[in-house]
């Protein structure tokens, strides 16, 4: 039997261990604090005053079908052509000057039959639009790839549509501690490349009676991370889906770096988009219209599943819990699951037969 005791470290070895510990702590330490008197003052510039500040995160929020993607494409068109945007304040001309590139990430619109066709119809310079239509989890590896694309193409605008498709299945968008790192990475990207990052996000009808900013799905930190938020809605009296007519507006509900701009209207008729100038639609009207819209419980459940599973496969337990929080009955949810052909499966990382059940949208 070996009864040899472990040898105590020598003084030299102790010194080396202390030094290695110091180096490790230094590598994990935050950057040095900055004396404000040494920081160079800088005025915020705008891609479109006062709605889209440069170097910041912006969110275009609304229900599915409200026109968020149309607005993102209209902004893309102006950026790639250097074209004008509606003037909210005549004394300020902080709209797009000179053409620039756009990185466009979308999982909701096909590149060939939707994004390209619509942008071409709106007169965008397609040579300046770099598009990607697959979900990318913007973790450390995903952000590294996006940084490479930004370095290569030097965009003035980055569009992410929708937000849920790029947060990954492991990130719970309702938890502040999980959403903060995600948005911090995007914030750093916008600042480093001096561009606007415009994110399309979904709203909840259940929040219609509360503050407009709280209507955005997910943790309140999501709204907190954005410097500007636009709420998009449709005018039910003017719109007519059967005639492919969508009339709506966007209300400016949050601005940390400038004044709130007036609401701006738009009109989409048979695939043709046009800004219509100042409009009457307010955040209260948009949320009230969403709350009073004639949707059946089944349609509400289908909408919930499309939004919740936009980013890919998710644990069944999480889906059921979130549905309960939003007032969607489990029986109705399962009927909607069947109607949408949502796939269910068990995925195991260990013994056969064990593991979590997941739901995901069909391919």
Image (spheres, rainbow, N blue to C red):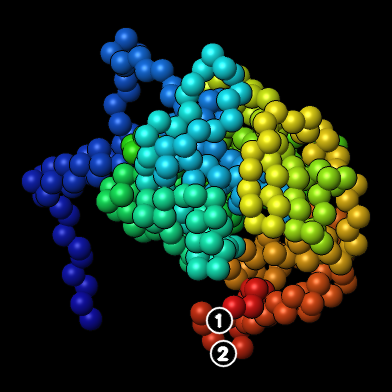
Q: Is residue 246 visible?
A: yes
Tell me the quarter of the picture where residue 3 sits: bottom left
Apparent side of residue 330 relative to residue 232 in the rendered image (left or right):
right
- Label at residue 348: 1
Q: Is residue 282 above or below residue 23?
A: above
Within 10 Å of the Cα at label 1, are there few (<14), some (14-19), or many (20+) other Cα atoms? Answer: few
Residue at horizontal 81 percent and vertical 72 percent from the top: 336
Count of numbered circles on the image? 2
Image spot of residue 196 (x, y percent): 45, 38
- Could you say which disc has been placed on residue 356 in the image? none
Picture quarter with the N terminus? bottom left
- Residue 56 in view: no
Mark 1: secondary structure: loop
66 w.r.t. 35: above or below: below
Residue occupying the point 63% across, 43% down: 274
Residue farthest along the top direction in this orientation: 37
Position of residue 135 in the picture relative to residue 240 (left or right): left
Asked if marks 2 and 1 touch (Cβ < 8 Å), the reply is yes
Q: Residue furthest left?
A: 12
**Mark 2–mark 1 distance (CA, rounded to whole Å):** 7 Å
Q: Is 97 in front, or is 320?
A: 97
Q: Residues within 10 Å of mark 2 (few under 14, many from 20)?
A: few
**The C terminus lies in quadrant:** bottom right
Q: Position of residue 119 (x, y in %)?
A: 52, 54
Residue 281: x %, y % from top left: 78, 33
Q: Nearer the viewer, residue 177 or 287?
A: 287
Tag 2 residue: 352
The picture places residue 309, in percent across and down from the top left corner, at 65, 65
């Amino acid at each position: 039997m070996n009864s040899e005791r472990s040898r105590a470290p020598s003084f030299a070895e102790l010194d080396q261990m202390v030094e290695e510990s110091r180096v490790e702590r230094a590598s994990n330490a935050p950057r040095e604090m900055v004396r404000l008197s040494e920081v160079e003052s800088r005025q915020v510039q705008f891609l479109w005053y006062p709605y889209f500040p440069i170097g910041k995160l912006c969110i275009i929020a609304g229900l599915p079908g409200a026109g968020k993607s149309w607005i993102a494409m209209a902004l893309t068109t102006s950026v790639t052509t250097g074209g004008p945007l509606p003037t909210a304040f005549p004394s300020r001309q902080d709209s797009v000057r000179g053409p620039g590139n756009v990185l466009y990430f979308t999982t909701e619109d096909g590149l060939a039959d939707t994004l390209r066709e619509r942008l071409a119809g709106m007169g965008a310079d397609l040579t300046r639009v770099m598009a990607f239509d697959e979900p990318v989890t913007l973790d450390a590896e995903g952000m590294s790839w996006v940084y490479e694309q930004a370095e290569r193409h030097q965009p003035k605008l980055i569009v992410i549509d929708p937000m849920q498709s790029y947060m990954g299945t492991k990130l719970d968008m309702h938890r502040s501690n999980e959403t903060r790192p995600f948005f911090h990475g995007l914030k750093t990207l916008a600042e480093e490349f001096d561009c606007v990052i415009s994110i399309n996000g979904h709203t909840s009808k259940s929040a219609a009676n509360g503050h407009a900013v709280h209507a955005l799905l997910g943790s309140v930190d999501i709204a907190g991370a954005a410097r500007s938020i636009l709420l998009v809605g449709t005018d039910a009296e003017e719109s007519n889906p059967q005639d492919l007519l969508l009339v709506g507006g966007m209300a400016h509900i949050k601005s940390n770096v400038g004044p709130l701009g007036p609401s701006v209207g738009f009109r989409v008729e048979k695939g043709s988009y046009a800004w219509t100038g100042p409009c009457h639609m307010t955040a209260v009207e948009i949320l009230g219209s969403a709350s009073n819209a004639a949707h059946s419980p089944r349609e509400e459940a289908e909408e919930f599943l499309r939004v919740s599973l936009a980013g890919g496969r998710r644990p069944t337990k999480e889906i059921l819990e979130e549905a309960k929080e939003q007032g969607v009955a489990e029986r109705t949810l399962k009927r909607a699951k069947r109607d949408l052909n949502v796939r269910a499966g068990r995925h195991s990382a260990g013994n056969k037969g064990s593991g979590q059940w997941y739901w995901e949208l069909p391919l």
